[in-house]
């Protein structure tokens, strides 16, 4: 990959805003989709901006991720492509989720370009809301010192923090002091650089090697993290303890970018049953949890979207009961995606695991017939 | 393991080969344990992961899925798709420590009555050895 | 005037004794009440059918993990219970259930409604961070003394309907001075009387549920209510103010999902009618230079206000479940009160009284767009 560098004078946000402004004015793209502070100043929402002056208020790299960017992309393009070229500035997991949504036919990315960046992580939403001003500083410091311990747990072990699945990528790692890389990660990205008059063919080797090194370290930390979580939450009892306080509000599902169903099965009529059915279920064990099917919902949601879970942490941020759902989902997703050699959002062309199959695969799930019962003629003793 | 543990086993079978196998078994007077409850579906490809999970959480001790042999599925590729789903479900159960080996997937052809009865008996033995599915005892699911 | 039943245990144990009686004497087939979950603490509603499960129940526990009205509606949606059931729930939950039953979302037939004079519940967040348990004993003391405990839900602090109107049986909790020694139970209806036929306890003379103590508490709550509304007023809840207040809303719609009055399976605001073509957005973009995505944040809340305010029971679920701490219920209760006054309607008061017509229409604001 090749790129150019941009100066960071005030802070990274300002550098990005200046770049986006220039891009809008030079016609590199027609509009920008990016986070911006909400009127009350204590959180962020996605804005689609065409008027460059509105960019001044924007925050391309906000300290939190209240709404997953893929949701913004999907609400814009679920019925088809836009006519204008739109550059979406987002964190890598948001771009990867948008890619998954395009495979699920919930987004049309033809005219959407993506600007990703070496993601420093995001602060837990509830932490942030306790004291936004103070936390803005915490984030800024963490960004400068390249520290992750104040970030959300899933961010601390994210292995895709530098994934360039978009068109342009802002590389912080390996850059000289006071500068960042602007890397063209696609032909379209290159074209934008050209339109903007950037020298887009400089080497970004130092970025690549630093990212590689960090990624290896992260992978190890991630494996350890999942190992620990499995000890903490694995098995029926610990798993039920994990969801002990779950109130079935389904915030996690509605905040999740890849849970796109307009009406979730678990909120559907399928669960409206006569009283007698509930009583029957209660009688089996003497007592029945209400609302019912807490664990089934969690497992069912997993079974629906485990291949596309991008470990973005949004579900966890949205949980009013502080259940670390994203951590658990990322554990299950990692193992399952590995099995299918699938990485969500890696490549737009790569088919979803359930949309394809091969004849010769997964023989390990076929239990071999050993004919041990041949003597007994299959009779039940 | 208590001797009188009678596992509850749900045997998902497609309405072609899977069911055919069970019919051949009965035509040949091959018995299978009565605690194995047959559950007919059109094709194994039509089994949703939620069917399996619901059975699993709601108190089955084990689940078998039988469809046509490779190449024989009456809807071309249902069995291959089912195999992927089973792989996925087993991976979820495994990563959460919920006992992935309580789910079996095995092809049975129409004429394979003995293979059908054997599978039921063998799986029954297997689950007896594993003991009851702990989830079914839990109240707070 | 209701008859009074006195049990010689404290209210907690007394209420459990009542439940034990109902279930073991097979007066009811099942009981919906709060239960402490094994293997670890965690509180939630359960449907209990086996008396052996009763020791783990906490019928009066000051927490509302779900609005029981919503749960009961779900249980009886497909038809009223053919067998008698009992439920122990807070007054606002009972009122919510009545509102739902009026809208054909459940049936009260065959359900024994047990409630309490309610000292309020803690915010869910406090059960999460473990702070609740430490506060319990001072909570109970303050309930005996008729006080408004400082850490209950803000909607509870301003709740003036803490005396259940519709329950068959009312346990005296708020303002009950001797609640650690005796359990005073009002038999509010003849149904209530007949269900406890045969229970061991002394029947005292008839007595009003409201008394000097409850009046005192009512005055304090009225003050709290005014304070809560003043706070909302200070935010200027006209359109501009709403854009401020709901600006950080992440659109999770958790508030509607947990609201008992929001019963639609598929909310209008999650439906296809509320999705737009990219060109619609682009036209708007060209016009205004910028727009928020996903759109319709304030529109959603306005819509929900229109749909629910006539029946909002002020339970506070919506605030508690909001991941970005928007005081949803303060706003909804305030608007609710205004609308309810206008129609002289009290939600959940009388099951025979129809919901005022013209206050609830499914598809009325399709045309109101709001995009920033
Ligand atoms: S399950 Fe959670 S972590 Fe995974 S994609 Fe959805 S919101 Fe993100
Ligand atoms: S849980 Fe399943 S059905 Fe529900 S929204 Fe998510 S993927 Fe769709
Ligand atoms: S958001 Fe939390 S409490 Fe709500 S359903 Fe999900 S895990 Fe349960
Ligand atoms: S719960 Fe809060 S964030 Fe979610 S939709 Fe309601 S107000 Fe918005
Ligand atoms: S709007 Fe809020 S306070 Fe009113 S009934 Fe619904 S959840 Fe309760
Ligand atoms: S028809 Fe038998 S597996 Fe598809």
Image (cartoon, coloured by chain):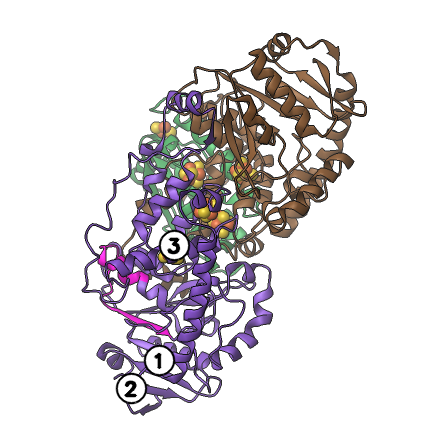
Chain colours: A brown, B green, C purple
Residue identifier under label 1: C21
Q: Secondary structure at mark 1?
A: helix
Mark 3 Cβ inside 8 Å of ligand 5? yes
Determine if marks 2 and 1 fall on one subunit: yes
The image quarter in which residue C131 lies: bottom right
Dot in front, 3 or 2? 3
Residue identifier under label 3: C332
Image quarter for ligand 6: top left
Q: Position of residue A53 (x, y in %)?
A: 56, 24
Work out how far the residue at label 2 is from the one at label 1, CA to CA, in angstroms: 9 Å
- How many other residues sit within 10 Å of disc 1, few (<14), some (14-19) or many (≥20)? many
Q: Residue at x 42, y 89 (%)?
A: C8
Dot in front, 3 or 1? 3
Q: Secondary structure at mark 3?
A: helix
* Label whose residue precedes the other's in the sequence (2 or 1): 1
Q: Chain of mark 1?
A: C
The image quarter in which residue B68 lies: top left
Q: Residue at x 48, y 62 (%)?
A: C154
Q: Position of residue C87 (x, y in %)?
A: 34, 69
Can you see residue A316? yes
Residue identifier under label 2: C198
Left or right of A35, for residue A83: left
Work out how far the residue at label 3 is from the one at label 1, CA to CA, in angstroms: 39 Å
Q: Chain of mark 3?
A: C
The magenta segment: C96-116
The quarter of the rendered structure image containing the N terminus of chain C is bottom left
* Label whose residue precedes the other's in the sequence (3 or 2): 2
């Amino acid at each position: 990959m090749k790129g150019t560098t941009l100066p960071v004078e005030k802070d990274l946000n300002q550098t990005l805003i200046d770049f986006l402004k220039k891009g809008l004015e030079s016609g590199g793209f027609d509009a920008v989709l990016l986070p911006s502070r909400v009127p009350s100043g204590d959180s962020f929402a996605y804005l689609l901006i065409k008027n460059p002056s509105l960019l001044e208020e924007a925050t391309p790299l906000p300290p939190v991720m209240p709404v997953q960017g893929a949701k913004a992309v999907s609400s814009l393009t679920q019925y088809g492509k836009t006519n204008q070229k739109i550059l979406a500035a987002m964190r890598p997991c948001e771009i990867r989720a948008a890619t998954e949504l395009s495979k699920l036919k919930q987004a049309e990315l033809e005219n959407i370009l993506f600007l990703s960046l070496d993601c420093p992580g995001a602060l837990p939403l509830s932490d942030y809301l306790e004291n936004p001003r103070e936390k803005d500083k915490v984030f800024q410091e963490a960004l400068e010192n390249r520290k992750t311990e104040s970030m959300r747990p899933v961010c601390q072990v994210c292995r895709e923090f530098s994934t360039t699945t978009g068109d342009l990528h802002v590389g912080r790692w390996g850059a000289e002091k006071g500068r960042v890389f602007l890397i063209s990660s696609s032909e379209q990205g290159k074209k934008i650089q050209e339109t903007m008059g950037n020298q887009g063919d400089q080497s970004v080797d130092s970025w690549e090697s630093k990212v590689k090194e960090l990624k290896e370290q992260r992978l190890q930390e991630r494996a350890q993290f999942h190992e620990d979580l499995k000890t903490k939450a694995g098995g029926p009892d610990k798993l039920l303890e994990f969801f002990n306080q779950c109130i079935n509000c389904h915030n996690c599902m509605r905040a999740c970018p890849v849970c796109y169903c307009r009406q979730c099965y678990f909120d559907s009529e399928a669960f409206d049953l006569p009283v007698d059915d509930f009583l029957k279920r209660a009688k089996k064990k003497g007592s029945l949890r209400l609302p019912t099917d807490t664990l089934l919902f969690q497992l069912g949601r997993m079974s629906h979207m485990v291949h596309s879970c991008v470990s973005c942490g949004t579900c966890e941020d949205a949980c009013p009961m502080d259940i670390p759902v994203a951590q658990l989902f990322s554990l299950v997703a990692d193992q399952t995606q590995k099995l299918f050699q699938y990485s969500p959002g890696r490549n737009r062309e790569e088919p979803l695991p359930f949309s394809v199959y091969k004849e010769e695969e997964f023989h390990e799930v076929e239990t071999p017939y050993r004919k041990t019962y041949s003597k007994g003629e299959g009779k039940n003793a | 393991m208590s001797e009188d543990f009678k596992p509850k086993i749900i045997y998902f079978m497609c309405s072609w080969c899977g069911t055919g196998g069970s019919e051949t078994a009965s035509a040949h007077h091959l018995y299978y344990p009565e605690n194995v409850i047959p559950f007919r579906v059109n094709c194994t490809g039509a089994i949703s992961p939620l069917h399996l999970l619901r059975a699993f959480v709601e108190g089955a001790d084990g689940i078998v899925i039988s469809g046509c042999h490779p190449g024989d599925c009456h809807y071309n590729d249902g069995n291959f798709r089912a195999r992927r789903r089973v792989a996925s479900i087993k991976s979820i159960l495994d990563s959460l420590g919920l006992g992935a080996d309580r789910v079996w997937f095995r092809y049975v052809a129409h004429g394979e009555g003995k293979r059908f009865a054997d599978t039921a008996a063998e799986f029954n033995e297997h689950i007896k050895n594993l003991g009851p599915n702990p989830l079914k005892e839990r109240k707070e699911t | 005037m209701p008859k009074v039943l006195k049990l010689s245990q404290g209210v907690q144990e007394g209420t459990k004794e009542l439940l034990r009686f109902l279930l073991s004497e097979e007066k009811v087939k099942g009981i919906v009440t709060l239960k402490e979950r094994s293997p670890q603490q965690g509180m939630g509603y359960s449907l209990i059918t086996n008396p052996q499960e009763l020791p783990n129940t906490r019928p009066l526990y000051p927490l509302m993990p779900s609005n029981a009205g919503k749960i009961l509606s779900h249980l009886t949606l497909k038809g009223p219970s053919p067998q008698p059931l009992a439920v122990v729930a807070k007054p606002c939950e009972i009122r919510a259930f009545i509102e739902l039953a009026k809208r054909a979302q459940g049936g009260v037939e065959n359900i024994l409604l047990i409630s309490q004079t309610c000292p309020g519940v803690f915010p869910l967040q406090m059960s999460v961070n473990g702070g609740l348990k430490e506060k319990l004993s001072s909570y109970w003391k303050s309930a005996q003394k008729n006080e408004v405990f400082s850490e209950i839900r803000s909607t509870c602090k301003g709740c003036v309907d803490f005396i259940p109107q519709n329950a068959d049986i009312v346990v005296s909790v708020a303002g009950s001075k001797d609640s650690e020694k005796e359990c005073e139970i009002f038999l509010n209806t003849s149904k209530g009387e007949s269900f406890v036929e045969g229970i061991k306890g002394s029947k005292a003379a008839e007595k009003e549920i409201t008394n000097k103590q409850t009046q005192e508490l009512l005055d304090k709550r009225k003050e709290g209510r005014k304070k809560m509304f003043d706070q909302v007023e200070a935010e200027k809840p006209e359109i501009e103010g709403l854009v401020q207040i709901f600006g950080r809303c992440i659109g999770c719609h958790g508030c509607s999902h947990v609201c008992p009055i929001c019963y639609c399976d598929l909310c209008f605001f999650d439906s296809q009618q509320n999705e737009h073509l990219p060109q619609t957005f682009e036209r708007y973009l060209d016009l205004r230079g910028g727009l928020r995505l996903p759109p319709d944040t304030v529109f959603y809340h306005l819509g929900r206000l229109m749909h629910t305010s006539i029946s909002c029971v002020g339970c506070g679920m919506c605030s508690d479940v909001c991941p970005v701490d928007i005081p949803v219920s303060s706003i909804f209760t305030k608007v609710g009160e205004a609308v309810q006054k206008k129609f002289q309607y009290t939600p959940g008061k009388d099951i025979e009284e129809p919901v005022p017509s013209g206050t609830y229409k499914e598809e009325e604001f399709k045309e109101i767009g709001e995009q920033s």
